[in-house]
Image (tube, rainbow, N blue to C red):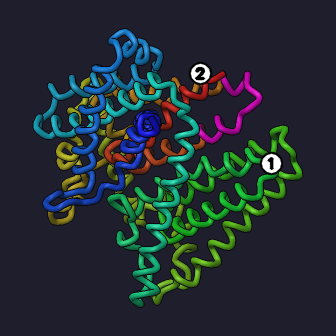
Amino acid sequence: MEGFFYFYNMIRYIPVLTLGLFFFSFLIGRVENAYDRIHPQFLFLAISNFLSLLYIFSTFSFEKISNAVKQNKTFLYYSIYIGISVISILFATNKIESLVVLSQYLTFMFSFLVILLIVKLYNLNFLKILIYFTIISLIIESIAVLYSVFDYVLINGNTFERLNVYRGFSGNVNITAFSLVIKSSFVYYILFKSKNSLRYDVFGFIILFFVSSALFFLLTRGAILAFIILNLFIISFLVISKHNHKIIRFKILFLLLTFISSYLTVGPIIRNDISSNLLLDRVSTISINTEDQSIGERLRFYNVSLKIISQRPLNGIGVGNWKFESIKYDVGNLEEYRVPYHAHNDFLQIASETGLLGLLAYLAIFIYPLKGLLRYLYNSKEKLLGICLIGAMGVYFIDSMLNFPIARPISHLYFIFILIGFESLTKSK
């Protein structure tokens, strides 16, 4: 009898464990003969999608599954965007590459479907799961960065430089930095939701110390700017809300001390022969400076995208084809065989590849859940978790303006979790 109850308890946790497989798929590293770590991750997600959907359709009726999907309008807009991407292949020069990229988008869409169905059909407390998974992920990712710096600089005696050695579980340091920032939003929920819990406060401040220290080592200007905006956004909400102002002021003070202490800890390590303080050098260049190579390249890519959009506003050039079509517009600036794969702005690249209708459908994925959450916040007394969700979406939006998170499972899959979190909160009232 004890064995039966043990087995029953294990079965109960299978949905949560399945969500964990999707959430932590970014831990899958680069395997032999794989060009990029995202390829084994997409393969894992595709297999997980197939097995999960096979189990779901064999367990639940089609009516239940259909009702669960129809309740989520965000998934509908997501499907419309994928549909427009499929049609755009007709106008693609390189249709093989379109199919490759489309397969990745379809993998994301089916992952969205699986996660949504698991949450709905098993009636899970998704927001609680999301917060737990996020905190665990933050600890793992930030410690991976800190350990890499510790090993490279302090143990091996190398001079600190901004290298991909510190990239942790992603393709480069920029992706890792934004992954830390978007997930840090929920640490503020732990800090300011508990009024007098010293245990939660200490835990939250330690995590933010790790995260801010990792960000200072990664030196990603866009991520640091997003982190500053996120902090100002949440702190502003706390200050103007009707929370206990004495406790809020006390915790905000400790928040500032946490960031200062992480900066003072990191500062001596990142000094090198070229600069006395690389962090200040990087932060001081957060501006539209065309002489900066990174900023100059992005501005060129944006200009190329705008030219493509002006010439193909309705049908686009075909999903996945920006990397090919951009060459004819930017050939004079290309160095040797170095060709840009992404426009470093998801919105401009989507408009270039799928036309303005594709862009509108993709923007609806942001706008629709945000509208629902704003209505919820207007009528609800408990607003902090909603503010944290908006903060996370805002960070992803900034990332999309500067990079290409739609192409990376570590970024876009978390965005899907956030989208389902929006619906879970608005439907909980």
**Mainly helix, strand or loop, the magenta region?**
helix
Q: Which residues are magenta?
A: 376-389
Q: Secondary structure at mark 1?
A: loop
- Which kind of residue does numbered mark 2 sit on? Lys
Q: Is residue 135 left or right of residue 386?
A: left
The quarter of the rendered structure image containing the N terminus is: top left
Residue most extreme to the front: 1
Q: Is residue 248 magenta?
A: no
Q: Is residue 230 left or right of residue 118?
A: right
Percent of width and height locating residue 279: 54, 73
Read off the residue under disc 2: 427
Task: Name above or below for residue 218 compared with residue 400.
Answer: below
Residue name at image x 64 percent, y 35 percent: 386
Q: Is residue 385 magenta?
A: yes
Read off the residue under disc 1: 195
Residue name at image x 47 percent, y 23 percent: 120
Q: Return the residue nearer the eye: 2 or 412.
A: 2
The quarter of the rendered structure image containing the C terminus is: top right
Q: Secondary structure at mark 2?
A: helix
Q: Return the residue nearer the eye: 196 or 73.
A: 196
Residue name at image x 51 percent, y 80 percent: 270
Residue 360 in view here: no
